Every structure is written in structure tokens, then in C-alpha cells.
Image (cartoon, rainbow, N blue to C red):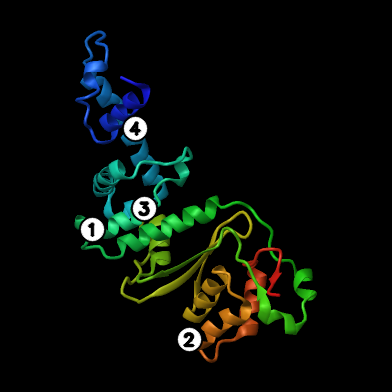
Amino acid sequence: MKLHELQHNFMNAIVDNSPDLLIPRIKICGNVSPAERLSVYRNNIIGHLVDALSDTFSATRKLVGDDFFRSMVKQFIPGNMPTEADINRYGAYLPSFIRQYAPAQSLPYLADMAYFEWLWNESFLAEDDAALAPEEIAMLSPQQYPSMHFRLRTSTRLMHAGYPVDKLWHFCEANGQGDAPDINMGDVFLLLMRPELELITLRLTRAEYLLLQCLSCGNTFEVSVGHALQEDEYFDIAAFVTKHFELKTFQAGLIQDQ
């Protein structure tokens, strides 16, 4: 058996629990059978991945309980093994898996909760960058604003959720202390960002969310503001600019359309 075949069969034995092709190749030593040896490997690897997902999606786990969560992710893992060495970056597809997971259909907010936690994880692990400095803004004339591209910080994540996942997250992190949020309060628009050392989560208006989303797609300030004004004709552009400069939402280095 060639090395790549051996590796492939070993992976199948661990991930799919299909050891038949590999067992005949394992030398028998002592009283532990080849099947038992593979089972030890499989239990250790799957257990490690379950623990990693439990840490990343701790609020999701608390909402459903340990038994439900572990059973769910054990079905998720075989078709979604890690693709990179950093286990902290594992789990991107769990929210979409939950959306299709039959036992979770009675908890329609669960997938949104998991997606919020994934964005939180991405934001926390994002590379450091520099915020747009006041002196860079001071160099602009009012006539230059429309054609400028304001880039969002690398840690910035935007989310539109059908449930108050930010409040649910805080409720879970407090281990259920305090009043539970009303999950039927309607849509929320969120900004997650790590401007300094700590990650922050803010509620946005729909117009504010649309403006930031447009900027994140590379649109000019003028085009992005246009989307916000279509949503809310009274949208306060000056207040938006002041707020997000103070929050350090934008990345250093302005780009202007020629």
C-alpha cells in the first residue's frame, strides 16, 4: 500500500469510522486489537474537535445544553474536518449546518446565535491594523468626501439577525442571570469590532448598517450614503461620520476615485 493510500484509509477510519481497509495493515501487539487502537485515535480526535467547538460556540452550547450540543457537532464534524492547523479558526460552517439540522428546527434563533459567535471569533482573531487618524481627515476638503473610499477595520464584522443574538449572548455569558431577552423583538443590525484590545458589539440602525455594508464592499462614500438615504431620508450623515471616527471604525489609508 502506497503512503497516500495509507493516509487516505487512515482518515476514513477516523472520520467516517470505516476501518475495514486499514485494520489488516495494523500489526497486532499485546492484548489491544487493531480496531480498539483505531477507536482510541478516533475518540481522541473527535473529542478534541468537539471541545474546540464547545469553546468557540459556548453560548450556543449553553442554549441547548451539553448533551444536545455534543450530539449535534459529532454529526457536523465528519463532513467538516479542519482545513488548517489553527483549531481556533475551526467551525465556520457550523451555523449553516445548524440551519439544516432537524432537531434544531424548534429553535429558529440557534443558527443566528452560532453565526454571531463565529463572527465574534473572527473579529477577535483578526489581524491588527491602524485606525484612520484625525489628521488624515483634516487633509480632506468637503468636495473630496463623495469620491473617498473609507475602509472598515480588519476586525469589523456586520450582521443582520432575525433575533436579538447580542442580548442572548450576554444572557448566556452571565449563565442565565437576569431577565431573559425577548427573542421576538424583531430584527437587529450589529457591528462587531476590536478597535483596541477588547471586542465591542454595537446595535445599528438599518440605514447605518446599509451604509457600512456598502463601504465594506468597496463603494465610495457618496454611493454608500445614497443607500442609507434611500432607507431613511432623514439619516444624519454628520452624526454618522462623527460617531464612527470616534469609534475608530475606519482603517488608516484613504483611497480616492480618480
- Residue visible at 65% across and 78% down? 241
Give the camera-side residue of 56 and 211. Answer: 211
Residue 127: x %, y % from top left: 60, 51
Q: Which class describes the residues within 10 Å of circle 3: few (<14), some (14-19), or many (20+)?
A: few
Q: Which class describes the residues within 10 Å of circle 2: few (<14), some (14-19), or many (20+)?
A: some
Tell me the CA gap for discs 3 and 1: 15 Å
Query: Label 3 belongs to which residue?
Result: 93
Query: Label 2 belongs to which residue?
Result: 231
Query: Label 4 belongs to which residue?
Result: 45
Mark 1, secondary structure of its residue? helix
> Which residue extends farthest bottom?
233
Tell me the CA gap for discs 1 and 2: 34 Å
Task: Check the image and report above or below for 222 versus 44.
Answer: below
Q: Which class describes the residues within 10 Å of circle 4: few (<14), some (14-19), or many (20+)?
A: some
In-image side of 195 versus 115 (left or right): right
> Which badge, 4 or 1, is on the more N-terminal residue?
4
Query: Closer to us: mark 4 or mark 3?
Result: 3
Tell me the CA gap for discs 4 and 1: 25 Å
Mark 2, secondary structure of its residue? helix
Residue 20: x %, y % from top left: 19, 25
